[in-house]
């Protein structure tokens, strides 16, 4: 007995049996043709869903550019049970700062002026962490 049949008390429906429920014998080229048509439909529907999700994401996305001498807050990634900047629990900060931007290192990368007590923080940041 196959593992799927043992777990779910029914046979696994492979792509060869998508068009009809029940027992069916493989009939050669027709079965391959039906399977290829089903795969084509699935790919089209996946592309439709991906383009819809991309449109949703792009509607909320905006390009942010910073200039030197501007101030930014840095987002702190949460880790359960770890002290972040002296506070643990519900009151731990999501953002720290403000920090002044010294210079732009790359197209999306900036260097903030961090105080000496923040030496453990990486001194180059991506615009997505601000």
Image (cartoon, helix red, strand yellow):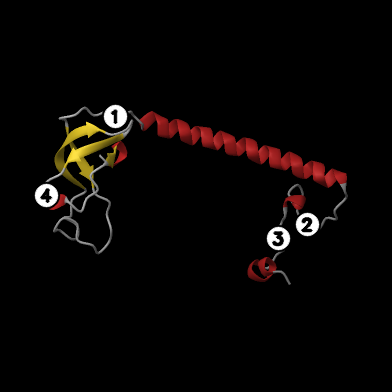
Q: Is residue 23 above or below residue 126?
A: below
Q: Residues within 10 Å of mark 4 (few under 14, many from 20)?
A: few
Element type at mark 3: loop
**Which residue lies most toward the left here?**
116
CB-based contact (under 8 Å), mark 3 and mark 4: no
- Sooner in the amino-acid sequence: mark 3 or mark 2: 3
Q: CA distance from mark 1 to mark 2?
A: 56 Å
Crowding at dot 1, Cα within 10 Å, few <14 / some 14-19 / many 20+, comes out as few
Mark pair 2, 4: CA separation: 71 Å
At x 69% / y 67%, what residue is drawn? 5
Instruction: Give the Cα separation between the discs numbered 3 and 1.
Output: 50 Å
Which residue, given by chain and number where applicable, does mark 1 sit on?
Answer: 64
Determine which residue is flagged by label 4: 116
**Disc 4, disc 1: CB below 8 Å?**
no
Q: What is the number of the mark on residue 22?
A: 2
Disc 3: CA contacts within 10 A as few (<14), some (14-19) or many (>=20): few
């Amino acid at each position: 007995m196959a593992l799927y049949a043992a777990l779910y008390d029914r046979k696994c429906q492979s792509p060869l049996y998508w068009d009809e429920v029940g027992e069916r014998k493989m009939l050669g080229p027709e079965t391959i043709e039906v399977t290829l048509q089903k795969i084509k439909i699935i790919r089209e529907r996946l592309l439709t869903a991906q383009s819809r999700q991309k449109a949703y994401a792009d509607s909320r996305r905006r390009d942010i550019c910073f200039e030197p001498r501007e101030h930014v807050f840095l987002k702190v990634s949460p880790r359960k049970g770890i002290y972040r900047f002296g506070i643990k629990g519900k009151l731990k900060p999501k953002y720290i700062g403000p920090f002044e931007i010294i210079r732009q290192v790359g197209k999306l990368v900036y260097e903030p002026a961090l105080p000496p007590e923040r030496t453990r923080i990486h001194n180059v940041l991506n615009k997505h962490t601000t």
